[in-house]
Each structure stands twice: as C-alpha cells, then as structure tokens.
Image (tube, coloured by chain):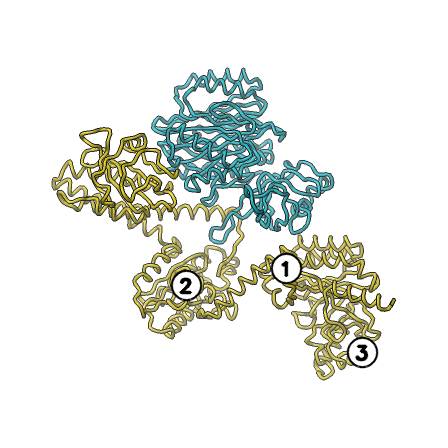
Amino acid sequence: MQHVLEGSEELREALVALRREVGTLRVEVTHANVLLEALEAMLDVDGDVDPFVGVFKALLPVFECSYAIVLIENIKDPCKLECVASTHAAAVASLWENGRKLGKVLSGRIVTTISTADDEAWPQIDGLSKSQPTLYLPLSVRGQRGLMMLLRDEDHPGFDRTHVTLARKFSLLASHAFAAKRASQTEAESHRLQHLTQQLKVSQEALKLRANHDQLTGLPNRAYIQELVEAILARKQPGQKMALAFLDLDDFKRVNDFYGHTVGDALLKSVADRLGTEIRQMDIIGRISGDEFVIVFDLIEQQSEISVLVNRVSDKLRQPFSIEGQEIRASGSIGVALWPEHGHDYDTLRRHADTAMYRAKTAHKGSFTFFSSALGNEMSERLSLEHRLRIALTEREFQCALQQKVDLRTQDIVGFEALVRWVDRHGTIHSPATFLQLATELDLLDGITDIVLDNLSQRLPLLDAQFGTAATYSINISASQATKTLFMQKLIRRIADTGCAERFLLEVTEESFLAAGAFQTQVLPLIREAGVGVSIDDFGIGYSSLAILADITADELKVDRSLITSIHQRPRSQSILGAIESLGASLGMSVIAEGVETLDEKNYLLNSSRIKTGQGYLFHRPQLISEIIEQQTCIVQKFKS
Amino acid sequence: MVALKSFVISNSSTAEALSELSIAIDAVEIDPNLICVFYDGDHEDALIFDYVRTRFPDAALLGGTSCSGVMSEAGLGGAGSIGLLLIEDADGDYGTAAVRLGPDACGCAEQALHAALAAADCSGELPELIWIYQAPGREEAVIEGLRRVVGDRCPIIGGSSADNTVAGGWRQIGPEGPMDDGLVVAVLFSSGGISFAFQGGYEPSGASGLVTSIGYDPAGESGVVTKVSGRQVLTIDGEPAAEVYNRWIGGVLSEKIENGGCILEDTTTYPLGIDAGQIEGVTQYLLIHPEQIGKNQSLSTFASIEEGTRLYSMRGDRTRLIQRAGKVASAAADALPGGSKNLAGGLVVYCAGCMLAVGEQMPEVSRTVSASFNNMPFLGCFTFGEQGSVLEKNAHGNLMISAVAFGH
C-alpha cells in the first residue's frame, strides 16, 4: 500500500540525505564492479593478446553505449591519432585529426558532448557519425598518450556527470594498470597488482553490502530486491513459477506513537528476523520502506504451496513480540502476485501484490489475498473513477439536489436537506453512493461541499420566492470535515454570507462529537456564534452513549432510516423511537424521522409518536435545484394561464 | 589547484568602494579565471564593470545587483556593499556570456549558453555546472532554453538580480558590460570538483487548493493553447485567489484584499508551494512567493504556475530561515568529492524575501554559512528568484537558498 506521508522538515531532510547517500553508494558499487572487471581483463591477458576485448565488454553495458574506440598518438605524425582498438571493426587503423577537443582529452580531461554535431573533423567511417553522443577519456597505452571514445546511438540521450565521474576513475586506474603491466612483468609487480585487485574486491563487497541493504534490518533494500527479482525472472524457464508477497504491518504507526520510535525500530528488526526463520532457503525477503516488506517465493509448483507458506509467516507474526520488556502484538496484511500470471516484471508484480494487500487489509487486517484480474479491474476502475472525480471537481460537475422535509400532519414543506449529485459532462447523474467514499478517501469532499453550498446559496432567492423564507436547509458534514477547523470556519463564513444563517442546519453524525473533542471545543462555538443550527444525523445507529449525549448541544435529532423502516411492525424499533423522543424532549432537541417510504410508516409516526417532521421518498424524491425551480415555474405558469 | 578569495567593501560611493577594493585585491596574489561581482543596486554599474574589466581583462565575469548588498565569510556587507569572488583554477575552464532577453527568452538562453561554452573554449562540451544571473520575469523560459541543450544532465544554479525596493532597478553584469534586461550565463569546468545544494526553509501548513484560472499567458510559443500558465493566479478552487490565500494565512492580508497592492513583505513567512516530487511518499516542495494582490483579487507571484496545479500553503519562521542557510552550505560542502575537507570556498544565493523575513538577524545568516563553509571564502547575494536542481530536475523557485561549493 502506498502510504502518503506529509512529514516535517526534518523527515524530508533525512530522506533527501538518505537518498543521496544510497544513490552515491549504489553508483560507487556500480563503478567498483565495472572497474574491477575492466582491470581484471587488462591484467589477466598475456603478451600480445588484445586487452581491450575484456575492457570493452565491461564498460559498454554500464555506459550504455554502442561503440568504443581507442586512439593513441601516431609516432610518425604527431598531428594524428591512430585507432588501435575498437568494437567497430571498420574504425581500427583509422587516423584522426588531433584537434582542440582530442588535444584536451590527451592532456588529461574527460569530455562529454552536448551538441548534435562535433565541431571537429572525424574520418569517414561507415556506421559512425559525429552526431552520436560521445564521451572521451584519456588513456595511456603502451607508454603513449591516448584516449578512449565511448559512443551512443544518435537517438540516445547524452552522457551525464555520473558517467564523467566513472570515466575519470577508470581512466586513472587503467592508465596506471597499463603502465605497471608494461614497465614490469616481474613476479613482485604482478603480486602487487593482484594484491591491489584483491583489496578493491574487498572494498567493493563492503560497499555492495551497504548500498544494497537496509541499515536497520540488514535485509535487501528496495532497489536491491528489484535487482534480485529481475535476476530471478531473467533465469526463469517456461513452466516455472514464482510468487511475490507484499507484507504491510498493521497499525505500525500506533506502535511508534505509543511506544516511541526506538521500540518501533526494534519491532521492525524482530519482524525481519522472524520472517527470516519462516521462509525457505531459496526465498528472499526485503524491506522496501517503513513497515513494508517483500517476500519472494521462488520455485513454486502450485498456488496452494504459497498459501501454506504465507499462512506460516502470518501465524508467526501474530505471536507476541517482547521488545524492551513490553509485549507487543503485531500482524501483517499480505497480498500475493504470481509470475507469470499476474505480471512479467518486478514493477507489475509488486504493484499487483500491493493491490492485493490493500484488499486484504480492507477486508480483515492480518489476512492475505491473491491478486486476481478482477481485483486488477477493480483497481483500474478505482483509478479511472479517481481521475474522473478530480476532473469533475475542477470542472464543477457536482450539483446540489434537495429533498423536502414535511410536516407529517399538513404535508407542508418545512425545509430541505441538501444532497450532492454528480452530473457528468454526458449528462449522466451519479448518486453519492458511487463516488462519496472515494471522494472522502481522496480528500475531495471539502471541494464538493463547497460547490453544493455555492449552488444552494446562488439559488436561495428563487427558492425563497417559491417556498417562503421560513424553510430551513440542511447541509451534510462528514465527521472528518467537522473537526477541520479551517474548513469549518470557511463554511460557516459562507453560510453567514447568505444573510440567513439561522435557516441553515449542519447535519453531522455522532462520530463528529466523539472525535477528540475538536468539534465540540473549536468548531461548535463558531457554529453557535453564527446562529447556524446543528442536527445529529443517522441518530440511533452510531456510538451514542448517554455520557456523550449529555455534552452535545444540538438542535435536532434525525432518527436513522433503519429505525423507521417498517416501524409499524417492529415493537423494538418503536420502543427505541420512544426513548429517542423522550431524550430529545428532555434535551430540548426536535426529532425528525428520515427514510419514511410507506403510508403505514407515516401513519404510525402520526398516530403513535410525537414526531412532527418527516423526510423520505413517500413525500419527495431528491431533485436537482434547477429541476425544482423549473417545475415550480411551470406550475405557476399553468396556474396563471 | 583551485583557490578562492572574497572581497567585500561597504561604502555608498562607488568610486571610493572600488578604490578600497583595489587596495585589498592588490594585497593578495591571485590570478582569477572566473569573477563573480554582486553589489547594492544604488552603485554605479559602469564604474564597477570598468574596474573589474581593467584589473582582470582575461577572467570570465558574471554578476549584478543584489538586494541591499552582499554577505561573505567576513559577515553581512549590508547597504552600500560591493562583493567580489575571485576563483583561480588554472587547470579548469570557465566562460561567461550575456544576452539581452528578447521576446524569445528560451532561444536567448540557448544562444548565451553556447556563447559561454565558446568563451571557455569548450564548445559542444557538457559543463560541470551552469551558473546564471538574470533579470526577474522569465526565469522558466530561460531554464527551458538551457535545458534544451543540457537537459538535466548538469545542474543549473543561479539567481534573479534584485534591487533594493522592488522597483525594477535590477541590473546584470556580463563580459561586455551592464544590462537591465539581460541574462548572464557562466559555464564551469573545475579541476577541483564542484557540488551544490538547493533547498527551501518552509513547511506545509495544511491548506491547499487547485489553481482554477490564470491570467492569460500561453505556455507555448504559438499554436493552440492546451495548458495555461503564468504569474497571475486569478482563482483557486473557483474563488478569487487572494481571498483564498488570505484565508489560508489567517487574514494577514485582509486590509489589502479590497484595493490590492504589494504583499511581498507580508508573505515572506507564508509562501505557496508546489509539489516537486516525492521521496518515499514524502512531498518535496518548490516555493513560490506571492508578490502582489491585483484587481479582481488576483495574486501575482515570482514564478509561473500552470492551471490545475495544486498550491500548498507553506509556513516558515526566522530561526528556520537562518539555520537553513547553514544547512544548505553544509550539504553543498559535504557533497564535494573528498567531502568538506576539500572545500576551497563557495557561492551562495539567498532569497531577498527570506532576508526581509529574517530582518535584523541577517548577520546570523552570514555567520552560519561561514561556519558551515569552515570559514573558507564565500560570497552571497540576495535575489528575487532562485534557480537550482530539485530531485535531479532543473527548476525556478522563490524563497529558496542555494550554495555552490568549490573543491581544491
């Protein structure tokens, strides 16, 4: 699961530093590898064997170039350089003008080109062009000054500063190696060179370990695990299988928040150790970020084997950890993607395993799920909906719909609840059920609420002309919105700007009152001061406790539809409704019934309760404001004619 | 071997300041290949240019006005100061070129870069670092022009020249003299290694919104406008931009909302940020400094913004802005080949907006940079825009701090 953290300055700084350090280490490891291979190639060949064959083989892949050319000063003509080795056979023995650029390289400078054409003359050689991005590095060969040119294909980007740095290292070491090899082939010299090579190998191993492993757990890091998986996949034969499991620790943030980061880090280390004991020898574990691990199960025959292995890992994680004298219980949600069914490369497998993990975590923390095409489709649809929702918000495609609240006795309209509808550019109207949850997850709800309120405020004069200035309007506010002081300030100011704040009610759920007091202490006073009313929505299904209700200062209790449905036939609901009525009366709050859909329900409320106001399909189905106004205008015109 | 020397003189008379500088410079032995000269906008450019050109006829030259003077390892130069940084590197190559920014700023930048490379005798070569100093206004186009040639393969660092009162009195100095609408490009091929750092000292404060309209300014040179960008934000989330921004920052600008006006000083601790990419899920921000409230409650900024961009409300404080300067200098020095022990000196760009926010504590900034640079020579200028590389991409931002470190 991709966690989006918004951290402090220090966190950002630490990450940049870490990234820079890891980047540097990885570059150094790559450089050390290449240098080793190239030097070994040079030192291992005897006598007249061309040492450049091995050198080119080592250098070409890492510089991502297509050709290499070695030029040395021509003894007969100092104005010329002669090609003594090349991966491009046609270039060998060609003569090159010793111009400004080549002269600079001969005197020790690394040069890489930026323009599309070199400004110096090149000999005519089939298959070579001055437009190819080129890296030049000095190289002393057989006691003579020389240089190496590395060329990329024309349509490839030019070399960057990292390549220049590597070229500088190689140039220096290679020139020394050539000089040493030529100057002395004594046993002592040979021994010294071998010793140096050995030392370089040891350093390279140490660097490799640091660059490729997570410092805390010692497990392969994100970049290295990718390399390992790619290497495994490259060796795979048809018919062989592999599985990649993505493990995300559940509620790890709570551990950090509750026990502190030292314990959190120790837990991660213990988790890594424990995972290590549960996998098979050929499997690999890596830590790819904070509390996310990847397990690669290689050489799998069938899917059921994975289930056994993953369950083993899950069970082991559930056993309590003892960290610094504390017993900590942990669990991990796991998603699994199979090769080749669910993806052919690391990125795809990791992404799909992540998707499956997300599903597992949503369904039941600590469980595991296999990726499936259905899950993939679901995720694609979610991404598509996310994209469309973001555009819809920018394009202001959301509209306010109203549902009447009526006097149960007279059927007079006493007010409206403002609801949201998404009218896309094709005119299709989407109900909130199709997008509200995702909009909430994406933090788009504030923008949508703003649009609904704008819509309503703009049409208020027309609505007043039709329904009178006594009608009230309710706006729904989610629990997360209710505790955002800045958002609520802005909303309340907008409502106040309508000039009739006292006709507005904010419908909040009981959850808002539970959220750490922010709503009660910071937001509610603002609402009160502006004269806006508060209605507790979906009352009766939340976390209501008398202790909390005692603190609530609301104007209205809105009884949840689940209690109203078939109330005439459900004695238990009737008793609860009776209790809510009493509660409302004693706390001075009016009570309204929502979800009234049948005559029987209405009649029960009329005859057997003290509830005066109702809302539901029986009275009115929500309509876009524009439709309501249009409809009313038609009625008036008909009446007049 | 690379050697740096910095000289700062504070004197409101240009002639007297140059006379004092001349004495100080003549007392040391240095044969610079590159000279950076920054000075308070009240000084006479022609005199400064003539002195430098005559004294060092062969050195590459770059510089211009810096808001309220300069700083160096000797401290804050303050009003009336002139600063010179002399970089001697016989084995390196340095070249500068200047161009007046015509209608095609992109093309001008490209042309100036090629000219600077030719001046360094390095035509067609990728420099180690490009350093630019320019008139504020078209920094994005300048960066784009330079990127056409080098992409993000080498860092582009620099600043936008500044006057003392944001009255448009900024100037630039290149190898051929002073200009007021120009761009000076320096290409650096050092023999001792160069490193850099580019950071801001602000944190997101929570609020954010989408830019829903921009004052018309087509992003391309011609053709159908598919994306609008510019420096005048008309609306955020469909509401007048200044109103939204004012709400985000707690009503600091309420008095200016109706009639508009300059808000540069009011907003130095509350800039806007745009997402410059993420590292491990943590957003990195490029800062944008709101400069003016216009008619219709629009918001003018010192950097271009595209429609549809999410703007984040950012927050900073004095202490952080002081410390950040030192951290940036340390980061640059540490990144040198061989680490900070190899440091020969540096060049620092500190946003003039940050300087306004730090106020009388500015001497602390020069002290902290000096400490981070191990008291090695450096010169710092104060600018109206900063250019640098964020997550390996060259970009223009505001309220940023950059440092270039030179290795021995």
Please report, as a chain letter, where disc 1 is located: A
Whether discs 2 and 1 lie on one chain: the answer is: yes
The type of residue carrying mark 2 is Leu
Q: Is residue B282 left or right of residue A198?
A: right
The reply to whether discs 2 and 3 touch (Cβ–Cβ < 8 Å) is no
Q: Residue at x 76, y 65 (%)?
A: A628
Element marked by disc 2: helix
Q: Residues within 10 Å of mark 2 (few under 14, many from 20)?
A: many
Q: Position of residue B177 (x, y in %)?
A: 50, 22
Chain A color in figure: yellow
Q: Which chain is cyan?
A: B
Which of the chains bears the disc numbered 2? A
Vertical order, A33 against B20 (above or below): below
Q: Are marks 2 and 3 in one subunit?
A: yes
The residue singled out by tag 1 in the image is A445
Disc sitting over residue A357 in the figure: none
Going by the image, does B79 lie left or right of A114? right
Residue A603 seen in the figure:
yes
Residue A432: quarter of image: bottom right
Counting other residues with Cα less than 10 Å from the Cα at mark 1, is it few (<14), some (14-19), or many (20 or more)? many
* Left or right of residue B130: residue A457: right
For the residues bearing labels 2 and 1, Cβ distance under 8 angstroms: no
Amino acid type indicated by mark 3: Leu
Amino acid type of the residue tagged 1 in the rendering: Leu
Q: Earlier in the sequence, mark 1 or mark 3?
A: 1
Instruction: Identify residue for label 3.
Output: A606
In the foreground, A98 or A432: A98
Depth check, front residue: A56 or A29: A56
Q: Identify the element where label 3 is drawn.
A: helix
Among the 4 quarters of the image, the one containing residue B359: top right
